[in-house]
Image (spheres, rainbow, N blue to C red):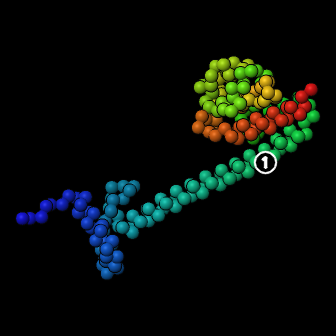
Amino acid sequence: MSAPELSQDEQEALVVQWLKACPGFFERHAEVLQEVRLKDPNSDRAISLQERQMHLLRSQNQELNLRLNEMLRFGSRNDKTQVAMVAWLQKLIEAKDINEVNSALESGLSSVFEVEVCKVLPVDPIFEKLLDRPICQAFANCPDVFKEKLGHLQANNEWESLAILAIPLDQSRFAGLVLLSKDGERFTEDMGVFYLRQIAGLAAAALRRVAS
């Protein structure tokens, strides 16, 4: 009785197993490596194993360079954000009245988040809903009830994303803070909001300090 015919995958698996079990094979038969021909990933021509390895190494180096550049870019951006954050906090501390606090909030946070507009919104009970979960999403998906609170700002058709925070002035009074961006990726629904809640807490402390 003849042995059952092996499939292509089974034959290749046996070859792989045999080569792993005989690590010295290519040392004893180096000429085999020179004769092996593989398909060039960038064309239809056949290339040697050594050439294929060079292609692979070149591709890996390019990927590593991209990752390194991305890390450097994020590192530079984080440094810039930290500098802007410290400058913002300094302005808040130095602000002497409600107008100066509002100005520090709006100009400082525009710089921290690199957005076109940051605006303190008047006290409204509806902002209490955002105390634990600020809005952070595409502008088009923002509920109309909150868009209405933006006044003339909502008429700008260039906004792509936004964040709206609740600023607790006391237990029953809540102002709002909106950040508007033309960048659709600046604020997205999958972003964490812990940082935004911290911003809201600092803004609230600054406003309560100068409240009459």
- Quarter residue 30 falls in: bottom left
| Residue at image location 65% in from the left, 28% down from the top | 159
Residue type marked 1: Val
Residue 165 screen position, x and y as percent: 72, 31
188 relative to 33, above or below: above
Question: Nearest the camera: 78 or 159?
Answer: 78
Q: How many marks?
A: 1
Q: Is residue 4 left or right of residue 40?
A: left
Residue 129 screen position, x and y as percent: 69, 26
| Residue at image location 76% in from the left, 48% down from the top | 82
Q: Quadrant of the N terminus?
A: bottom left
Q: Is residue 197 visible?
A: yes
Residue projecting furthest to the front: 171
Q: Is residue 183 visible?
A: no
Q: Quadrant of the C terminus?
A: top right
* Disc 1 element: helix
Question: Nearest the camera: 152 or 51?
Answer: 152
Residue projecting furthest to the left: 1
| Residue at image location 74% in from the left, 21% down from the top | 125
| Residue at image location 83% in from the left, 42% down from the top | 89
Residue projecting furthest to the bottom: 28
Residue picked out by circle 1? 83
53 relative to 183, above or below: below
Q: Is residue 142 left or right of residue 79?
A: left
Q: Residues within 10 Å of mark 1 (few under 14, many from 20)?
A: few
12 relative to 32, above or below: above
Residue 113 screen position, x and y as percent: 72, 39
